[in-house]
Image: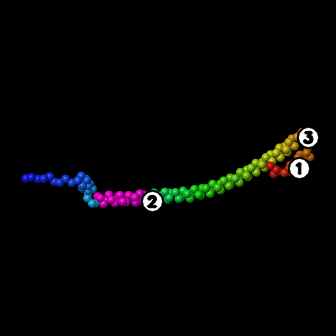
Amino acid sequence: MNTAPAPAAPHWVQVALSVLGILGGGTGLAAIATVVVQRGKFKADAADTLTEAALTLVQPLQTRITQLEGEAFSARSELGMLREQVNQLQFVVRVLTRTLDRWRAAIRAPDATLRKVRATVAESDRIPEMDR
């Protein structure tokens, strides 16, 4: 008996059949095709999910930052007013200290008399206190 060898299939056909067999036939190919087609959709869904999560975390922080900026502005305004008040009080303290020093000097002067002390006090009343 003379048997002839079976005709050889092209190499690519053999590879394709092997791949089909490995992937489980049409079901495996369908799954791969689905993954390839929906790969872009998966990326878009993941990006949307991450964006929503980030916004959920950022929005309360933005609200709090706005509140803190308002509080900081108020605090700076109040600080400015308080600095001005401190400056005014420091001026008044300097004026009163100078007045007290003049009175002490008048009282401790070797030639101090009640009339001279009264004149010094009366003179202090005439000095404008708010000259800077």
In the picture provided, is 132 more to the left or to the right than 122?
left
* Numbered disc 1: secondary structure: helix
Amino acid type at circle 1 is Ala
Q: Give the range drawn in magenta.
A: 28-48
- Residue 81, visible in the rendered structure: yes
Amino acid type at circle 2 is Asp
- What is the number of the mark on residue 122? 1
Badge 3 or badge 2: first in the primary sequence: 2
Q: Mark 2 points at which residue?
A: 48
User: For the residues marked 3 and 1, what is the alpha-carbon distance in whole angstroms?
Assistant: 18 Å
Badge 1 or badge 2: first in the primary sequence: 2
- Residue 113 spot, x, y in % from top left: 91, 44
Task: Nearest to the eye among marks 1 and 2: give it.
Answer: 2
User: For the residues marked 3 and 2, what is the alpha-carbon distance in whole angstroms?
Assistant: 94 Å
* Numbered disc 3: secondary structure: loop
Amino acid type at circle 3 is Asp
Label 1 crowd bin: few (<14), some (14–19), many (20+), radius 10 Å: few
- What is the number of the mark on residue 44? none
In the picture provided, is 79 more to the left or to the right than 132?
left
Q: Residue at x 13, y 53 (%)?
A: 4
Residue 21 lies in quadrant = bottom left
- Residue 48 spot, x, y in % from top left: 45, 59
In magenta segment, residue 95 = no
Badge 3 or badge 1: first in the primary sequence: 3
Q: Mark 3 points at which residue?
A: 111
Q: Which residue is drawn at 85% across and 45% down?
A: 103
Q: Which residue is drawn at 61% across and 56% down?
A: 69
* Numbered disc 2: secondary structure: helix
- Residue 108 spot, x, y in % from top left: 86, 41
